[in-house]
Image (tube, rainbow, N blue to C red):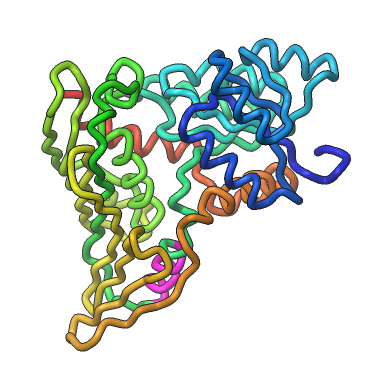
Amino acid sequence: MASNGAFKLAIIGAGGISNAHAAGVKANSQKLAISAVIDPIPANRTKLATDHAAEQFDSVDSFLAARAGGKAQADGVVVCTPPSARIQIIEKCLKAGLHVLAEKPIAHHLADAKKLAEMVQQYPKLVTALAYCHRFTPGVVEMKKLTAGGKIGKLTRFENCFATYFPALREKWMSDPAVSGGGSFIDTGCHSLDLFLFLVGTPKMQACVKEFAWEGRGESSATAIVKSAVQGSIYPGVGGVILSGWMEPDRFTVSLVGTEGTLSYDYLKPTELVFQSSRGGAAEVLTVETHEVRFAKQLLAFAEAAQTGNRGVLASFAEGVLTAEAVDAVGRG
């Protein structure tokens, strides 16, 4: 912890997703600070470092060497690199005594996911977590609370769609299976699988149909059916429908369907959680805080966990393996 009281974060990988974390830091500037930015591309790291008055480094090794010599500071790191590059980075940071929040998915294939989950067990005093930010969406949190309180009766189905029109991904690493592990399903579908894990229970893959719009790249869309495990789930035996896509109109919705009604959250209507009774009638619209706070809330939870040991709802690496197993069950083809 820095002397000014702010929890200092080093951002490793200054690509697109790092901007969401940086905005979360700015929203909590009294409690969080970006102290270092690490990226091999000068333009990426310079912009982010300049915006936050942070030190910049071209590699993790140079950052850790500077920190060991007292020329750089950090309490924890946020790893925003592609999945295939993470395992050595995370290991080096843990050895240096740094808390680690890693972007999703945990790895680009199941073998590395398991290696990472085993690795972090060797550092029980350090907080390691995966950045499954939708656990911190206020509408989702309220949905979980209301369902547990019986608002929708008996839970019977989970429905989730994260789809958008983003053809430029054809040329990005996210659609390169060698780097990302697949396409839209491992990219956004892993968020969906974690939401299922968070709201319902351990996802077990039942079926998945994929569409490939681009030759030699990962799937451009996927339709998956999962079912919560009989043991260890909040609601055993509940089915889920997960839709992901990169060549579709924008749809970002989560619904929990029950015998007495349905709770639905649409990210395009960020302050509304809707309850529709099974008996009909007008929908009940509940006001919730916007989902735009989810990165800020996640970073605060990470800092709190590092300081107090209270993990809250942060996703663990072990939970990341559970979602990786569901992705692996349908393969890359």
The segment highlighted magenta reads: 141-149
x, y percent for residue 325: 31, 33
Q: Residue at x 51, y 25 (%)?
A: 118
Q: Is residue 133 left or right of residue 264?
A: right
Q: Residue at x 13, y 34 (%)?
A: 210
Q: Residue at x 46, y 63 (%)?
A: 141
Q: Residue at x 29, y 46 (%)?
A: 203
Comparing 291 with 261, the one in front is 291
Q: Is residue 52 left or right of residue 142?
A: right
Q: Is residue 167 left or right of residue 45?
A: left
| Residue 124 appears in the rendering | no
Please say whether residue 270 is one of the residues in the magenta stretch.
no
Looking at the image, the residue that sits furthest to the right is: 3
x, y percent for residue 144: 41, 65
- Dominant SS of magenta comes to helix
| Residue 269: quadrant of the picture | bottom left
Total labels: the figure holds 0
Comparing 37 with 242, the one in front is 37
- Location of residue 138 with respect to 81 vertically, above or below: below
Q: Is residue 54 left or right of residue 190?
A: right
x, y percent for residue 270: 40, 63
- Location of residue 127 with respect to 135 vertically, above or below: above
Comparing 213 with 89, the one in front is 213
Quadrant position of the C terminus in the picture: top left
- Location of residue 308 with respect to 275 vertically, above or below: above
| Residue 89: quadrant of the picture | top right
x, y percent for residue 102: 52, 32
Quadrant position of the N terminus in the picture: top right
| Residue 223 appears in the rendering | yes
